Amino acid sequence: MKTTENKIQYCLYARKSSESDEKQAMSIDGQLREMEELAKRERIEVIEVITESHSAKETGQRDKFNYMVECIAQGKYNAIITWAPDRISRNAGDLGRIVDLMDQGKLQFIKTHSQTFSNNPNEKFLLMILCSQAKLENDNRGINVKRGLKNKCSIGIRPGVAPIGYLNTIKANRIATVDLDPERAEIIREMFYKVANQGFSGRMVKRWLDSEGFKTRNNCGLTLGRIYATLNNPFYYGEFKYGSKWYKGSHKPLITKYIYDKVQIQLEVVPRQWNKQVFPFKKLCKCGSCGGSVTAEVKYRRTKKGIINTHIYYHCNRIRDYKCKEPYITETELIKQLIILLPELKLNTRYLWQEFNEEIKRLNHLKAIIYSDQEANIQLTPHNIKKLKLEDLSQEEYLMLQSYLLHILQFGTPEERLKILSGIQSKFKLSDRRLLL
């Protein structure tokens, strides 16, 4: 669609940035209304209306603008009507494309609400100055905002939305401050004290808040992640970090630094070494309530004398049922119950006999070293390893295997226990801290 040389056909272009730095710019509807009245008053023929919500800071990022430039290059229209020059461009790259179209004679006019730019040196120069001024305003605005935020921090006011338990307040002199939230501040303070003085964990805090019906300003419950973020936030004792610097806040602290430090100690978790800790009884049994798998974890308890005791607990992994109420059982208690069930267990005699023979060989070797008897070769193995079935073993031999299993369960390392448990073919389930066949 080629236009004739003397016929001017316009494209109406309206743009509003989706970013906060142009919130005061005229809305798209307002631009369209003003430009349509101008076109009607001056009898301007508008071929196409293009609207766009996108920032003009960066070059080549506006799809509708790129489409308009292509249509001008193809001759679909040869003039633009828009509210102001900064609606077309706020960067040098897009401005250069517009001026280049004017130099080629493909763009004849750019009409705004107050002036017209045609293809002559003076008006093109003025157009470039106005668009460059818009770019300068953008650049200065970013610098001014950063300076304002820095000054705000220097007087003790943390930029951004106040954390839960506080409210952003604008005073009569238009200065924004951070004040205590009368509805939530006391609950947040109590949350810190429960962790510091009563040893509450994050999940315990969440259960307590849910039972109290606690809601955020958006009428939502406090998530577990946000509970931890709140407990780790130094803002509550009067300081905050912005950028790489620390500032003393002018707001009223909810807690003292002493309480904050106690909370951090309480929440400190010993780093986990994945795949390093061996829990031999995980695959031995299933949860008696939901039928899910059993997992284990290490807990560290500090005594009043400062001694740290280590305990291993087995429990349902709660993958099948997140709310499974099956209680924990200690590894010590689990071993005791497994020993009681030894006479009833179904054993893989070939595997256990092989392990038993290896243990006897090690014992013979140790005895030879102790007595410096290189010729010692006492065979303590009562039978050949080729015994495969339970009925091939005598009662004495079977009791010997059970004794060996008992020895490993009581005194073996986690790795030895894991290895020897492969010889138990019976299946178990954990129910109310009881190990059941």
Image (tube, grey):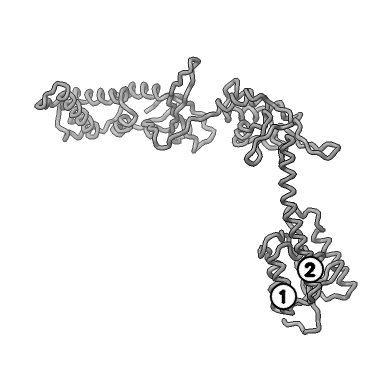
Closer to the N terminus: mark 1 or mark 2? 1
Disc 1 marks which residue?
A: 101
Horizontal placement of 183 versus 401: left or right? right
- Looking at the rendered image, the quarter that the C terminus falls into is top left
Side (left or right) of 254 relative to 262: right
Residue 416 falls in which quadrant of the image? Answer: top left
Kind of residue indicated by mark 2: Leu
Q: Residue at x 84, y 71 (%)?
A: 116
Residue furthest left as drawn: 375
Check disc 2 and report the residue beneath it: 127
Q: Which mark is residue 208?
A: none
Q: Quadrant of residue 336?
A: top left
**Within the image, what quadrant is residue 104 found in?**
bottom right
Decide: few, some or many residues near mark 2? Use Cα within 10 Å; few <14, some 14-19, many ≥20. Answer: many
Pick the residue in front: 141 or 408. Answer: 141
Q: Disc 1 residue type?
A: Leu
- Most extreme residue toward the top is 305
- Residue drawn at point x = 65 percent, y = 28 percent: 211
Foreground disc of the pair 1, 2? 2
Residue 218 visible: no
User: Which structural element holds mark 1?
Assistant: helix
Crowd tier of the residue under label 1, counting other residues whose Cα lies within 10 Å: few below 14, some 14–19, many 20 or above: some
Q: Give coordinates of residue 79: x percent, y percent.
A: 78, 75
